[in-house]
Amino acid sequence: MWANPEWRGTLYPPHGGGLEEYARVFTTVEGNTTFYSGAPRAETVAAWARQAPADFRFCFKLPAALTHERRLVGVEAAFDAFLDALAPLHDRLGPLMVQLPRDFGAEELPRLEALLARWPAGIPCAVEVRHSEFFHKGAAETALNRLLITHGADRVMLDVRPLFSTPPGGHPGLLQAQREKPRRPLHVLSTAGCPLVRFIGHLDPAINERYFAPWIERLGLWINQGKTPFLLVHTPDNRQAPELARRLHARLAEHCSLPPLAAFPGEDQARLF
């Protein structure tokens, strides 16, 4: 997301907040709005195209109507229409995410294969599976990984270890996040050129630092291999997400050649007064 009033006074000025200001600091965003609302209107996409710089990347999710309601059955026309709606942003698309239902198992992989066979070559794809059989290193997982490698799609790596590292302890945001996020093992692998990590942080910064430490070497390795990893950062209620993203970027920059993040516009304005 980029529209969060809780970020005013830090990432955003007290009366600001929007894509243009967000993109002054960060270079990518996870677009959940398309998952819930479907293809955006033409005027909305045109506004995003005006506000996002050339090096910015949108990581939109396919609509749930395609992945969850229709379970990838007979979605060809709707998928094409979704891509057409995003046409003004095709030069600024990061991996489009196919988030599959928790009960989407190996017997439905032919549906995923049909979608990937239709996928445009110029648009990266990342698939997030949640069925437990894809995390047992058995035949189902082998079939999935081979399918992704064959079609040049990355497998989303959902890292929920920080989130589930402690009981919720009465914090409503932590409790809700633990109820909503699937508790699945982390399998670290890159099946294509844009490895995508969704790091679901904790409220405790020390816990986040500990679980992020192994990612530093892995992300650096992928960068050195010429890949373009995407790191999408969440916290239980997302109030702390910008600060966490900045801390993780700083840790990674200690080991990789990364351009510095710009100052948060809200903090800059606060210093003026």
Image (cartoon, rainbow, N blue to C red):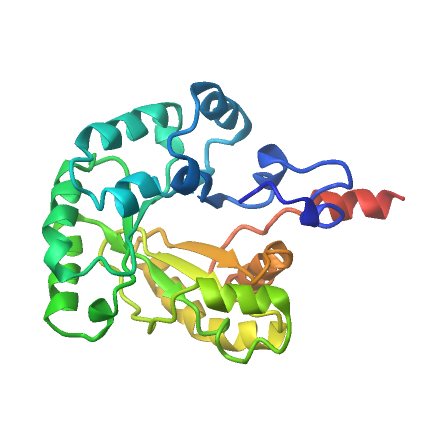
- In the rendered image, residue 53, in percent from the top left (x then y), is placed at 51, 31
Q: Residue furthest right?
A: 273
Q: Residue at x 62, y 78 (%)?
A: 169
Question: Which quadrant of the structure image shows residue 58?
Answer: top left
Q: In the image as oriented, which residue stretches furthest toward the front?
A: 69
Q: Residue at the location (63% across, 46% down)? A: 262
The answer to whether residue 99 shows anywhere in this view is yes
Q: Residue at x 34, y 62 (%)?
A: 157
Left or right of 227, for residue 257: right
Q: Can residue 62 be seen in this view?
A: no
- The residue located at (19%, 37%) in the rendering is 119
**Camera-side residue of 25 and 72:** 72
Residue 231, x across and y down, in percent: 44, 56
Residue 59 picture quarter: top left
Q: Taking 176 as reference, is 142 left or right?
A: left
Percent x, y of residue 186:
34, 71
Q: Quadrant of residue 191?
A: bottom left
User: Could you tell whether 273 is left or right of 98 in the image?
Assistant: right
- Which quadrant of the figure contains the C terminus? top right
Q: Residue 153 location, x and y as percent?
A: 22, 50
> Up-down: is 93 above or below 214?
above
Q: Where is 51 relative to 271, above or below?
A: above
Badge count: 0
